[in-house]
Image (cartoon, grey):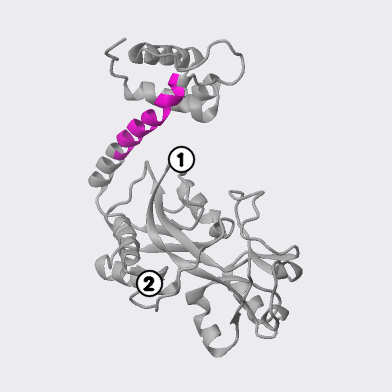
Amino acid sequence: MSDPGTPTFDQLRVFLTVIDVGSFAGAARQLNRATSVISYTITNLEAQLGVTLFERDSTRRPRLTDEGRALLSEARNVALGFNRLRAKAKGLHQGLEPEVHVALDVMLPASRIVAALKSFRDEFPTVPLKLRAEALGAVTQLVLDRTSMIGVRGPPDVEIDGLERIGVGSVHLVPVAAPDHPLACQVNGLGAGRHHVQLVLTDRTSRTAGEDLGVMGTHTWRVADLATKHLLLREGIGWGTMPEPMIREDLACGKLVLLDLPDFKGGHYRFFAIHRTDMPPGPAASFLINQFEWQSHGMNGGTFASTDTAAPIVSMPPALAAQ
């Protein structure tokens, strides 16, 4: 076929649902249709495009043909465009949000949060805001679950189905400990951190289950919030990485010290503003995203220039990038 036809949005939605759930029967349940209708829709889509999308010689889970794999990303892009169009039109009908629910990564510097929220309060004084601070995968999960309308999450720097993301800068992470900690009182060789308790921020969700990101020590203590980790570090319980703006005063007054670990230098923790592709933010939520994006334009070395002095750029080991 030299001139393929034009698939309908419904055909593309059925195609993508089969891929996402892994079977024709599963797609039928999710779309509340008969399995025969799903099969008929896929057959019609193949006829429209003039290609075979699924292998027909297997009773296992549907397997894409080479042509199907080649067209999958384009089908997702088209479906995404339709979802954006419909959701944007819905947002225009609804107007200003009655309230805004936001989830923020605990690593996000307080100076950035305060600056964005002050601007939000001045711009939308009548819009209530509900704010949650979470670590690691919890921000992503809150947005995916529709509990939060928008979020600012950290690594990993990957696309997640169903989410839009915008880079909004980074924060500098540094390894620290109390001044009387053994790692602060000696010249450290390679692997020195493995012999001491490392304080590690843990995920409240299962999104990073099975992943031990940014962990060097063989003896770890897991904490669920950054404030507890900060407290234990100051008390000399262990060592670990912290956002530099959060412990700047501790470094200045000697309550914490930077550690010289040859194989663990710290680095940058990148942030992304996110929202569901089928729930584009309204005027108020969009304003908040724009504030965080604007802040990132004035950053130098991962630091918010309007309130923080610049921190040196240090390359980050891949494992640390998600810690």
Q: Residue 292 in the image: x percent, y percent?
A: 35, 63
**Label 1, label 2: how far apart the Cα atoms are:** 30 Å
- Residue 78 is inside the magenta segment: yes
Residue under pointer 2? 304
Q: Nearer the viewer, residue 88 or 79?
A: 79
Residue at image mark 1: 161
Q: Residues within 10 Å of mark 1 (few under 14, many from 20)?
A: few
Q: Which callout, 1 or 2, points at the residue further toward the start of the chain? A: 1
Say whether residue 105 is visible.
no
- Asked where in the image residue 112 lies, by quadrant, the reply is bottom left
Residue sitting at x 60%, y 86%: 255
Residue appearing at x 30%, y 64% in the figure: 294
Residue at 66% x, 61% y: name it: 215
**At label 1, which amino acid type do we have?**
Asp
Classify mark 1: helix, strand or loop: loop
> Residue 303 at what x, y percent from top left?
41, 71
Residue 298 seen in render: yes
**Secondary structure mainly formed by the magenta segment:** helix
Q: Position of residue 315 (x, y in %)?
A: 51, 63
Magenta stretch encompasses residue 253: no
Q: Which residues are magenta?
A: 67-84
